Amino acid sequence: MSKLDFHNSWEKIFERYNLYSIIKTDGYVDITADQIKAVERKEPRNLTKIDFREKLPKIMKEEGLSILAIKNGLYRIAKNDPFIDVKQEIETKIIELPTPQNIISIDPFNIKSESAALDMATVSNMLEMAFGEKSKLTIRGRLRGALDFNIGNIHYNVDGVQIEVDGGYESDSSIHLIEAKIGYNNNINIRQLLYPQLFWEKQIGIKKEIKSYVFYLQGDIFRFIPYYYDGAIGYLDHAKEKAFVFENPNAEIFSLNEIQIDQSKVDTNIPFPQADKFDTINTMMITISENLCISKEELKTKFAIVDRQIDYYFNVLKWLKLCIEKDGCLILTPEGERLVDLSFRKRMQEIAKIVFAEPIMNAVLNNKNPNEQIFLDYNIKSQSTIHRRLQTANAWVKYFRDLFSK
């Protein structure tokens, strides 16, 4: 489903059932999967799976509305914000850990899945440090359950909705629930944190304390951010975050300023990049590598970026000659496959050699004014467009300088 179809479909649904008038009167409205499907015969799941604030349909975003599943095939639309913000900058000290010995089935410097990241956190004793106690894996996967909560004055009686836990770890006194992500997103739906928290509180009662965390593998940094339910939607306590990185005695010294200009390394037929978050580009590359065939529509559901930006970010991978689109599938080129199999830092070194070989990027890297003729080669003529492209270039310089200064 295209982004235009998605937004248009929700406008038609609101119009067909006069939803906004009901919300203004009652504070919320419930809508069934059958009602959604009756409008344009589209799969309701594709219209209702909204994991990030940026994915809200235009009509909901403009009116400050959101949608949450409350029963199998039943959804509640209300005027509230069920998304929790996640800070990108780590406020606590990053703890260096020795690389686990005698573990060869998982490469600690090239992890591509949430489950592998959690398993590495287990064998390295990272989880014990994050939780402050020893624990064992006892919960993983999907189940269905019932729970109650309020957002503002709107009550949610949830029953039979799918609840997923990436990792649940039980100690003598607590159960630790983890929502795991590869890469960084700036917000998360409470469905992924609050639903498991309340479900397991109901199951366990007062026998053990339920504690929840957001876990991000952000580059090569393992982040565990505690989540607390405060009777509203809850919040992340970044002041109590635990962050870890593995010592790498084999890490090479790498200098960005030694990169020489070679424009042939990028595809100048692809628009010059306008995508500021390079960690998102790396995560997108990993996501594509882990799927035999993934479409742009599927890819965009996995990132907290607005729909129009999916082309900007995917185009970066095409510009780098690391990815192509074939028969509706996004696939890595042979060079993309080679790089994604490298350790994170080695991969970033190789990508930096491509990025900053491009003349505009190289000029920005070395604090020089880019030759405007090169922008014309990309068919960029307006000063406002040049400004946006240079904003991306500066963001990338900062990202790579910060990375290789650590």
Image (cartoon, grey):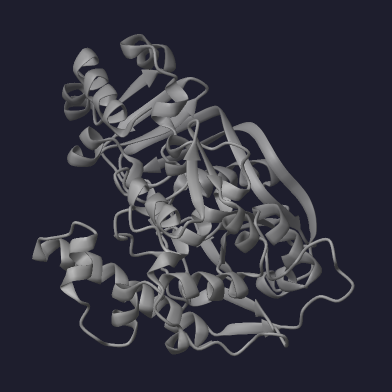
Extreme residue in the top direction: 38
- In the image, residue 250 sits, relative to residue 378, either above or below, namely below
Tell me where residue 9 sits by quadrant. Answer: top left
Extreme residue in the right direction: 102
Measuring from the top left, give residue 18's x and y in whole percent.
19, 17
Residue pictured at 72% horizontal, 72% vertical = 126
Measuring from the top left, give residue 269's x and y in whole percent.
33, 53
Measuring from the top left, give residue 385's x and y in whole percent.
16, 61
Residue pictured at 31% horizontal, 39% vertical = 56
- In the image, residue 226 sits, relative to residue 89, either above or below, namely above
Is 50 left, or right, of 274 in this rendering? right
Q: Nearer the viewer, residue 393 or 152?
A: 393
Q: How many marks?
A: 0
Residue pictured at 42% horizontal, 43% vertical = 300
Measuring from the top left, give residue 171's x and y in whole percent.
78, 61
Q: Nearer the viewer, residue 367 or 243?
A: 367
Q: Would residue 184 be seen by someone viewing this image from the given angle?
A: no
Tell me where residue 46 sits by quadrant. Answer: top left
- In the image, residue 391 sits, relative to residue 180, either above or below, namely below
Is 164 left, or right, of 294 in this rendering? right
Is 174 left, or right, of 301 in this rendering? right
Q: Nearer the viewer, residue 177 or 86?
A: 86
Tell me where residue 276 sits by quadrant. Answer: bottom left
Q: Would residue 29 be seen by someone viewing this image from the given angle?
A: yes
Is 243 left, or right, of 134 in this rendering? left
Q: Nearer the viewer, residue 296 or 16?
A: 296
Q: Quadrant of the N terminus?
A: top left
- In the image, residue 305 sits, relative to residue 162, either above or below, namely below
